Image (cartoon, rainbow, N blue to C red):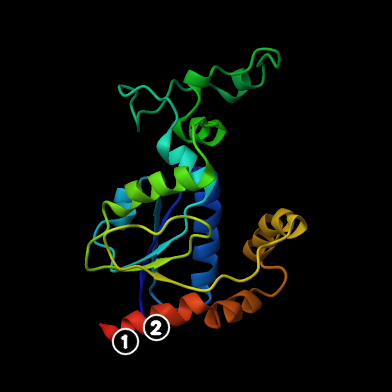
Amino acid sequence: ERDLEIRLFDANEERLDLMDRLMRQALEHTGRGHLVASDSDPAEVLTEADAVILCVGEDCARRLLNPPPIAEDEAEDEPGEKVSLLEMGYGDPNRPTKRSDLSRHTQSIIHRPVVEGSRDELIKLALETVMKPISSDAAVLNLQRGASQPQGRYVETLNWPPELDEMERQLLPHRILRWIGGEPSFFELIEEGRQSPVKQWLDEITRRS
């Protein structure tokens, strides 16, 4: 019912892109002037945020604590040497492209971070990094399951629904892709969102301000 600027963070750029598309698709149906931004750097999206919903998984924590080893002097936005479409068709399948020749985005996607520590320890360390740019005046909702509460500030929590079983975990990404594609009815997803505890929390902090 009110215009929002929604910012998404995930250290996994492939998953971040999926959720960015889902968010934009959902907001198209509202007819409002909502804005969406996403970034794999928590400081870029959390600085000056009025309300923050925390949910950092193990994969995100590992990627945040051990990012892809990309050379600092590599030009971020410089286009590479142009290759004709004809030349691209003559690649050797037995000689894959060197990692150093891949784009930053592709390197980030295929990176498999190795970080010592248990799930809870890694998530706690990642949360400390994520919490740094958050203003002390921001309302924070913690959706972490089985991880330590961030220290030094007031953080609200919600009661969690039952954990997904293994089959539900496997089907969830496909369900999201079907929502993005518009099949089945996207309005079912919107109605679920209207009734969610997170929506109720957002309404409550809006009333406080």
**Mark 2 burial class by Cα count in 10 Å: few <14, some 14-19, many 20+:** few
Q: Nearer the viewer, residue 108 or 159?
A: 159
Numbered badge on residue 203: 2
Q: Quadrant of the C terminus?
A: bottom left
The circle drawn on residue 159 is none
Q: Is residue 11 visible?
A: no
Q: Are marks 2 and 1 in contact (CB under 8 Å)?
A: yes
* Residue 104 image-quadrant placement: top left
Q: Secondary structure at mark 2?
A: helix
**Is residue 171 rendered to the left or right of residue 61?**
right
Determine if residue 39 is in view: yes
Residue type at numbered disc 1: Arg
35 w.r.t. 100: above or below: below
Position of residue 155 in the picture relative to residue 91 (left or right): left
Location of residue 162 in the rendering, given as x and y in whole percent from the top left corner:
65, 69
Question: Residue at the location (61% across, 71% down)?
Answer: 161
Residue 102 vs residue 189, the one in the foreground? 189
Residue where numbered disc 1 is placed: 207
Q: Residue at x 59, y 25 (%)?
A: 85
Q: Quadrant of residue 38?
A: bottom left
Badge 1: few (under 14), some or many (20 or more) residues near its Cα, within 10 Å? few
Q: Position of residue 191 (x, y in %)?
A: 59, 81
Decide which of 163, 180 is in the foreground and name it.
163
Q: Dividing the image into 4 quarters, which one contains the N terminus?
A: bottom left
Q: Taking 123 as reference, is 206 above or below it? A: below
Judging from the image, what secondary structure is the residue with disc 1 in? helix
Q: Residue at x 64, y 61 (%)?
A: 176
User: Is 14 placed above or below 194 here?
Assistant: above
Residue 52 appears at what percent x and percent y?
36, 65
Rendered position, 1 above or below 170 = below
Q: How many marks?
A: 2
